[in-house]
Image: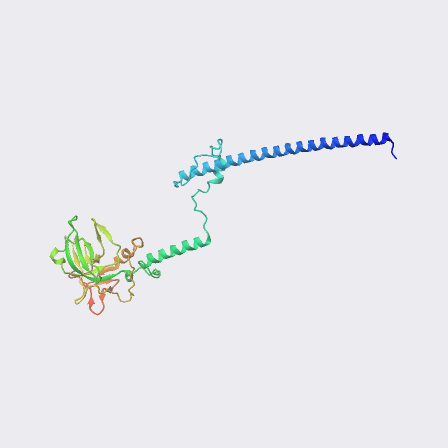
Amino acid sequence: MASPEVLSRLEQRAVQAEQMIQVLTKQVGQLQKVAVSALKDELRRENLELLQEVDKLKTCLLSHEKTQGITQYYDFTSQMTPSSSACDPQIQADVISPPVQASPAPQTNKQNKEKGDKKSEKKEKKAGGGGGKKQEEGPVDVSRLDFRVGRIVSAKKHPDADTLYVSQVDVGEEKIRTVISGLVRHIPLEEMQNRVVVLLCNLKPANMRGIASEAMIMCASTPDKVEILAPPAGSQPGDLIEFEGYTRNPDAVLNPKKKIFETCAPDLKTDANKVAMYKGIPFTVPGKGIVLSQTMSNVQIK
């Protein structure tokens, strides 16, 4: 058995060990608190730097979009940090070169497909005159011009233009067309009444002194003299004008930007026999005859 002295020393050492454990435990807890506090301070510092960086980027973006004339749909005036109003040159170079453009929100594949389908439908309607399959682009020639026979139902002077007639013309459609023509100085008003004419019917309607003109009366023309082209005897409103060798396939409405009529116009002339021609091919009403000028040969048709 151990003596009382040995037992006393062992008890003392156990008490000392317990005290040492308590001291070490306390020190470890303090170290942990210091480490956590230091980590928190570091995270706060990094967070503040990131917020300042974001504000700089916003300021640069807003400034550049304004210079590019991009409409603003958001408010960057209230910044996240008080020290971020300046636009760092390096940030500006990294962010706004090439120029920043306002971007729409990302779209899903389904949204992109629906958007593409709608665009295709719009293009098809525009090309086909409001519906149906998309019209293929044909060659730029007389086949794309919609020449028809018409009959002037009535004509009068334009109320706001001394040189213009306003005519109501039957072209074989359900609705009578209004046609403005600059013929006052060349054709007496009484000769305009009930007259059979050749019309270009697929020009885009044009407003002339407040009245929309829906076609053009074709004439043999020089700077000094103008004559209305005469369809062959027996022609009726709505009869089509055709050209041998050119399959008739007129646009629903001529696109002014494509200059189709302007491209064909230099080749529209009367020949030596006063026959209306396109590149030497006569204006023809099938089964009835050819279109003529009354007296003018070898002149332009306008």
The one nearer the camera, 145 or 36, is: 36
Q: Residue furthest left?
A: 190
Residue 14 horizontal/vertical position (percent): 78, 32
Please indicate, yes or no, whether residue 188 appears anywhere in the rendered image.
no
Q: Quadrant of residue 272?
A: bottom left
Residue 249 horizontal/vertical position (percent): 30, 63
- Rendered residue at 45%/39% (across/down): 61
Picture quarter with the C terminus: bottom left
- Rendered residue at 62%/34% (across/down): 36
The one nearer the camera, 240 or 132, is: 132
Q: Is residue 178 above or below residue 63?
A: below
The one nearer the camera, 101 or 147, is: 101
Picture quarter with the N terminus: top right
Residue 215 horizontal/vertical position (percent): 22, 57
Please indicate, yes or no, whether residue 113 appears anywhere in the rendered image.
yes
Report the side of 36 relative to 209 (left or right): right
Q: Residue furthest bottom?
A: 287
Q: Is residue 120 above or below residue 87?
A: below
Colour mode of the rendering:
rainbow
Q: Quadrant of residue 120?
A: bottom left
Residue 248 horizontal/vertical position (percent): 28, 64
Number of marks in picture: 0
Q: Quadrant of residue 169?
A: bottom left
